[in-house]
Amino acid sequence: MKPTTFREIDGTSKGYYVLLGLLGLILAAGLGSAYYMEHNGHWVTGMNNQIVWGMPHVFAVFLIVAASGALNVASISSVFGKTSYKPLAPLSGLLAIALLIGGLMVLVLDLGRPDRLIVAMTYYNFKSIFAWNMILYNGFLAIVIIYLWTMMQRKMNKYSKVAGFFAFIWRLALTIGTGSIFGFIVARQYYDAAIMAPMFVVMSFSFGLAFMLIVLLATYQWTGREIGSHIVSRLQRLQGLFVAAVLLFVVIFHLTNLYATQHHGVENFILAGDNIYSGLFWVGYLLLGTVFPLIICYAPAFRASIGWTAAAAVMVIAGGLSQMYMIIIGGQAYPMDLFPGKDVSSSFYDGVVASYAPSAPEVALGLGGTAVTFIAVMIAIKVLRFLPLSLANSQTDPHYSAEER
């Protein structure tokens, strides 16, 4: 393998500024929506007393989980010594930070009163998983910034492996903390499961790598830089492995629930109900986000294809959003089992399935957070050397020989 040369992108083309402008408009719409909801109150959203985590939470949790997984490539190179991925490690760290910032922006603006965030940062109730997550999110940002410093500053390179190891451990803790938010809520039958924590870890691997593939392939195609079949094929198969792992955990989760009689009701609601959640599971998550990507990642006809690999990554993200919507919204829509074995009814919608339809401001806020991620990446790769000048096989394949040219 030849030494890797990192260079900023030119970022002077008309396409660059058009894309940056479009993302800026989406961000402006998101901020405007946050102001609209803050000024008028959450009654203008689709949320109600039963569905208190709406569409912005779907985006926020999805981006935060993906942030952890975006660090996959850097972890594989630093912690597990896979040199093929080393040229992509700085971009991996950058994307992890950008995704987390985008997700936290959505989360803070959706909760309302962002000016009181300082209270959450200075007063901790350590019996609450949310307090632990405040530490995990801030710690993740700090550790990944240090990790990037050790990678990009030549005299600090000797500390890169140690920093990568700490970042790897911290990212696992962060995702376990996020999954535990749902796993610890015993009042909701669809959430109350210890497997939520490891399932979120595996989901983060898949979602984060999908974002990484989209950013990487789009950047190299649009800037005319070379990317070889070796790295595309490796990332493609890695994506397939993560998608299969998520499927395994989802199957275990549902089989475990189906074994317990008390969960039959909510499982029937999610898997076989006449509602949007069943459609999102079978069509959104399973077909679009799992079966199609697996075919693309492993069928020889699609091997190392940049276009099909990008398509698989887009489908994984669409399927992941469907899965997150099903978990967060569907889990709240199913009525709580207040008195097991008894029928419950009241004038306050107890015992009935809650309705929810995301409003336009909620969707705009979620998209605004996603736009922040891409804007941050676009600006960073223009001003700093995050990207290798070339990812040709000679740069990434340790077994490459001149005869293969």
Image: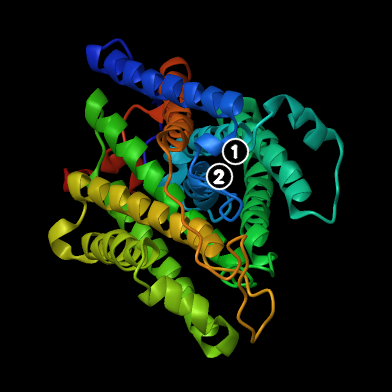
* Mark 2: amino acid: Ile
Left or right, 366 with respect to 300, comes to right
Taking 27 as reference, is 71 above or below it?
below
Q: Secondary structure at mark 2?
A: helix
* Mark 1: amino acid: Leu
Which residue is at a point 63% across and 75% down the rendered structure image?
337
Taking 108 as reference, is 241 above or below it?
below
Q: Nearer the viewer, residue 359 or 145?
A: 359
For the question of whether residue 132 can be seen, the reply is yes
- Residue annotated with mark 1: 107
Which residue is at a point 50% across and 54% down the rendered structure image?
204
Q: Please state the total of marks drawn on the protein image.
A: 2
Q: Given this view, does label 1 or label 2 mark the residue nearer the observer? A: 1
CA neighbours of label 2 inside 10 A, class few (<14), some (14 to 19), many (20+): many
N-term mark: 1 or 2: 2
Q: Nearer the viewer, residue 267 or 36?
A: 36
Contact? badges 1 and 2 (CB < 8 Å): yes
Residue 5 image point, x, y percent = 40, 27
- Residue annotated with mark 2: 64
Residue extending farthest to the front is: 347
